[in-house]
Amino acid sequence: MRADTVTTLTRWVRHGLLAVFLTVLPVAVFAAPFAAMVMDARTGEVLYSKNADTRLHPASLTKMMTLYLAFQAVESGKVSLDSVVTVSQNAASQPPSRLGLRAGQKIQLRYLIRAAAVKSANDAAAAIGDYLGGNEANFATMMNRQAKALGMNSTTFRNANGLTRQGHLSTARDMSILGRHVIYDYPQYYNIFSRRTADAGIAKVASTNRRFLDAYDGADGIKTGYTVAAGFNLVGSAQRGNKRVIATVFGGTSTAQRNAKVAELLDIGFARAPNRANSPQPVLMAKASSDLAGPEVTGAVDTGDEGEAPGTMQVAANTANKVAPASSLRPMKRPGTAAAPEALIADAAPHHDPEAESLAVQLAANAVSTPAPTGPRPLPRSPQIQQAGTAPGTVEPSAIEGAIAFAQSTAPQPETLALGDEPQFDPDMVAEGDADPKDPVFIQTSTPQPETLQLAEQKAPRNDTVILAAMTPPAPAKQQTREVIARASTSGGRNWGINVGKFNTQYAAERMLLKTALMESDALGSALRKVAKTKTAFEANFVGMTKAGAELACARLTARATDCNVIGP
């Protein structure tokens, strides 16, 4: 009897060990290949790489390209953040992670962007692709052409969300390149990737990247990815001082392991990156846009982090919100998209003309007085820089300041909305990619959520005449442009100045003044900005300075490879 019992127990143990072996073996056999890259974001210099050119499954890192093309379409004026998208059957049929879209449903583009960037919603990304490209195949063609234009030579896209598809492959190098362009080509939208939560219209969604953002000092983005075939992927970016580093990992074994590896790689990057980067002359980054990202929200519920078993739900509130820095160095001007004639693909190279710029200035002046602006203001104001008047017959400089945009736009920009006082929410567990969560991953409301924009704590209805960022200016307003004639103060020996360039348009001169003022706020803190119109050009000058102050400012600007000449009395 005892022998039979021992034999039975032995058989059970053997069967149990065999079951464990058969369970673990597929994981070991089918573990996703590992690849990594570390890049100095300022210059594009590779600081570390491993299998960086191996073509692997990018998973939801794909959504960076979908969002890049969406930002491009908005900035070109082809669409706006308020454009209403009709959800296609293709988008509505996508597997989790999902926003919960239904075929035929109408939703604003801004909400789809938030859901794709923050929650990594597959249905939202597919809806964006079908809207911009007409269908999945056309949008994939647009994605591939843009990838080639950015130098992503080993990438092939087949869909907008990154769900596993034969031939849908990329590399750690290419995704690092794409992440860098998202950061620097569309900085006014980049802060969407630092959000812990967002209002996506029909749901309040939680970030798939919260753990990394909270754990690593200086982290402010950018995109996670997970599928069974890909493993746990992440393109992460962080800024410390004047250094910005991008680290990319393919094939992580878990969220925690992937995040730890990215943190390790970022540490390597910050240790190896020089304090001063020999990069092209920097272009001012726009101020983060709260109009797209919206405020942090409460009530967003998710279960299980990407690819992990659901069942643990933990809610935390009022965590500190990290947003994208106001300024940084930018890579070379992004390539144009002349080779992509499909509808709604934006031309990356701006076209300026004096009449359009004058119109943009006038509209911006009107937008400043509008009680409820609806779009982002891309350039931050510097409280230390005072504004001087322009030559007679020119537009009021304060209005121009509102119209100055970064290099690829000539259209007016409304006021940036404050983020600091908004309530914040921080989920602990999030579903992502094609990992199938067992519990609801959002709270759905009966009606879409309207924008809760505030200016000076006063609510007002949306003014439809205010155009969102970088849309083509509408018909000129009837209000006449005001003329301001001002003289710089010459008291206390402040009759010196500096010239930082001559330009074909007043817009370009004003933009250079703003960029320079923010770049050297210490040296130019008491100076006045002034555009002087001559017969042949618009001169960008800082006036009202002492001789010593002017010489010091020029010396500092010259060290930054910026042209500068001292102007005497």
Image (tube, rainbow, N blue to C red):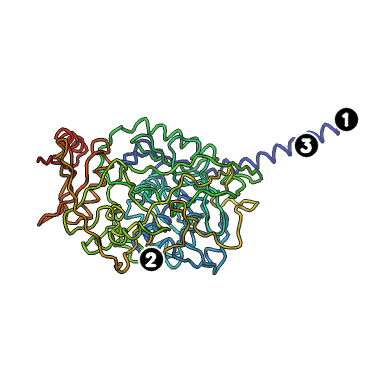
Residue 212 visible in the current orientation = no
Q: Nearer the viewer, residue 419 or 43?
A: 419
Q: In the rendering, at what x and y percent does residue 323 appear?
A: 43, 43
The CA span between labels 3 and 1 is 14 Å
The residue where tag 3 is placed is 11
Looking at marks 3 and 1 on the same chain, the residue that comes earlier in the sequence is marked by: 1
Q: Is residue 150 left or right of residue 540?
A: right
* Outermost residue toward the front in this view: 491
Snapshot quadrant of residue 38: top left
Q: Where in the figure is residue 452, as x and y percent of width and height?
A: 50, 56
Please, what is the three-letter code of the amino acid marked with disc 2? Thr
Residue 222 to residue 396: above or below: above
Circle 3 sits in a helix, a strand or a loop, which is it? helix
| Residue occupying the point 45% across, 55% down | 168
Spatial CA distance of label 2 from label 1 is 89 Å
Which residue carries the number 2 mark? Answer: 465
- Say which label, 2 or 1, has the lower sequence index: 1
Viewer-closest of 221 and 133 = 221
Q: Secondary structure at mark 1?
A: helix
Rendered residue at 90%/32% (across/down):
1
Give the spatial CA distance, label 3 vs label 2: 78 Å
Disc 1 designates what residue? 2
Q: Amino acid at mark 1?
A: Arg
